[in-house]
Image (cartoon, rainbow, N blue to C red):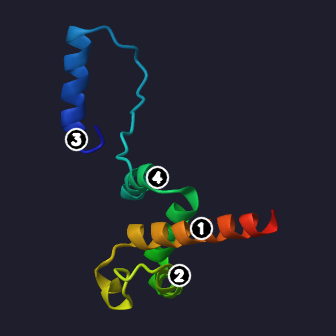
Amino acid sequence: MLSLSADERKQLASLNKETTPVSNTNQEVAIVAEPEEIALYQNLQQKSHFKSLRDQLRFLIKPSLRQQHESYISQKATTSGYKALAPSSWQEVNDLTVANLYWYFQGNDESAKQSATT
């Protein structure tokens, strides 16, 4: 509606009057497309834990934060025996995987702490 010229709007209005009864109010309804960020958020929300999702969004804004997660994962992977998580391959790994791995190891740390206290 908003992209139509004034003449096209008049033609459309007269067409509507001829075919259907319409009130005489001149209200226009703006149709707004969903922002790309919301679609991205909803997609990531289905694949991630809340804290992981938060970190992924932080990586989009400030990519340097990702390095802290990478070093933590490398450290925990080494101590856990996960040799496939070598530090040399981090450039190929997407933000979703880095954030999810970080929170996976965080969860294991919390479980270990709770087991030690009981």
- In the picture of the structure, the residue carrying the numbered disc 1 is 108
What residue is at 64 percent from the left and 71 percent from the top? 109
Dot 1 or dot 3: first in sequence order is 3
Dot 1 or dot 4: first in sequence order is 4
Residue type for callout 4: Gln
Q: Are marks 1 and 2 in contact (CB under 8 Å)?
A: yes
Q: Nearer the viewer, residue 38 or 83?
A: 83
Residue type for callout 1: Asn
Dot 4 or dot 2: first in sequence order is 4
Spatial CA span between label 1 and label 4: 22 Å
Looking at the rendered structure, the secondary structure element under dot 2 is: helix
Q: Nearer the viewer, residue 16 or 92?
A: 92
- In the picture of the structure, the residue carrying the numbered disc 4 is 45
Q: Quadrant of the N terminus?
A: top left
Which of the two discs, 3 and 4, sits closer to the camera? 4
Which of the two discs, 1 and 4, sits closer to the camera? 1
Q: Are marks 2 and 3 in contact (CB under 8 Å)?
A: no
Name of the residue lying farthest toward the right: 117
Q: How would you rate the neighbour count of disc 1 (Cα within 10 Å): few for under 14, some for 14-19, many for 20 or more?
A: few
- In the picture of the structure, the residue carrying the numbered disc 2 is 76
Residue type for callout 3: Leu
Residue 56 visible here: no
State the image coordinates of residue 57 (x, y, percent, origin top left).
Answer: 48, 68
Spatial CA span between label 2 and label 3: 59 Å
Spatial CA span between label 1 and label 3: 58 Å
Q: Nearer the viewer, residue 50 or 61?
A: 50
Which of the two discs, 2 and 3, sits closer to the camera? 2
Q: From what the image shows, is residue 62 above or below residue 29?
A: below
Spatial CA span between label 1 and label 2: 10 Å
Looking at the rendered structure, the secondary structure element under dot 3 is: loop
